[in-house]
Amino acid sequence: QVQLVQSGAEVKKPGASVKVSCKASGYTFTSYDINWVRQATGQGLEWMGWMNPNSGNTGYAQKFQGRVTMTRNTSISTAYMELSSLRSEDTAVYYCARAPRIVVVATWFDPWGQGTLVTVSS
Amino acid sequence: SYELTQPLSVSVALGQTARITCGGNNIGSKNVHWYQQKPGQAPVLVIYRDSNRPSGIPERFSGSNSGNTATLTISRAQAGDEADYYCQVWDSSMVFGGGTKLTVL
């Protein structure tokens, strides 16, 4: 079955960076985009950006421009999201999600990874 | 930036029909997708492109979209439908609604 499995929880200090991985299985990794969405405790969903694993092309939400980098390793069907200059407000669960490669105005997320808790604390 | 407005909470009696709305300017011209999220779990897609159900989602879940409001309808509500529900569209960026907590009484 199609599955996205993310790396484990992280604790980081303010100013540090975090890199979360998302390993895909059950489908051709390069045929679908990977998006990243985060959710602070008790809050809603916030989209961070997308990546085309085939080309490596990316698109980031304006809020995260300059702080987020999305990459991939196609040999192991794994996508990565790195967020730098962490602050306490970045404490959240980070999800990867697969998206069909269609016109962006129509695309949706299915399935999602299990989530990775990133805690930023001094 | 584009905003999606959802009610904070909706309550429905067991076995009755729940309707969760998602308001946005001319949202009827956009593709709306809906996700269900239970506590401690990742979101799950329940409706895509306004009214399509992914495989494995019960027929009790349906969607519509017109004018300034999209609606997720859950018929014959069950206790297991209790969850947060989010709508999502694209408007220069991916946008999520604030989420609606569905309580089944």
Image (spheres, coloured by chain):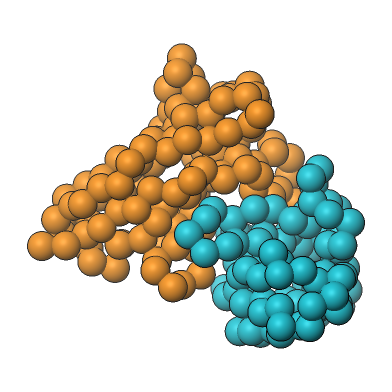
Q: Is residue A42 above or below residue A32?
A: below
Q: Is residue B46 above or below residue B54?
A: below
Quadrant of the rendering where the C terminus of chain A is positioned:
bottom left
x and y, in percent, of residue B65 in the image: 86, 70
Quarter location, residue B84: bottom right
Give the colour of chain B.
cyan
Residue found farthest to the left: A122
Q: Residue at x 89, y 56 (%)?
A: B59
Q: Quadrant of residue B85?
A: bottom right
Q: Position of residue B74 (x, y in %)?
A: 82, 69
The chain whose colour is orange is: A
The N terminus of chain A: image quadrant: top right
Q: Is residue B61 visible?
A: yes
Task: Let me know if residue B4 appears in the view.
Answer: no
The residue positioned 59% from the left and 56% from the top of the image is: B43
Using the image as rendered, state which of residue B66 and residue A105 is in the foreground: B66
Residue A46, given in percent of the width and then of the height, sits at 49, 63
The quadrant where residue A86 appears: bottom left
Q: Is residue B38 above or below residue B54?
A: below
Q: Is residue B69 left or right of residue A4?
A: right
Number of labels in the image equals 0
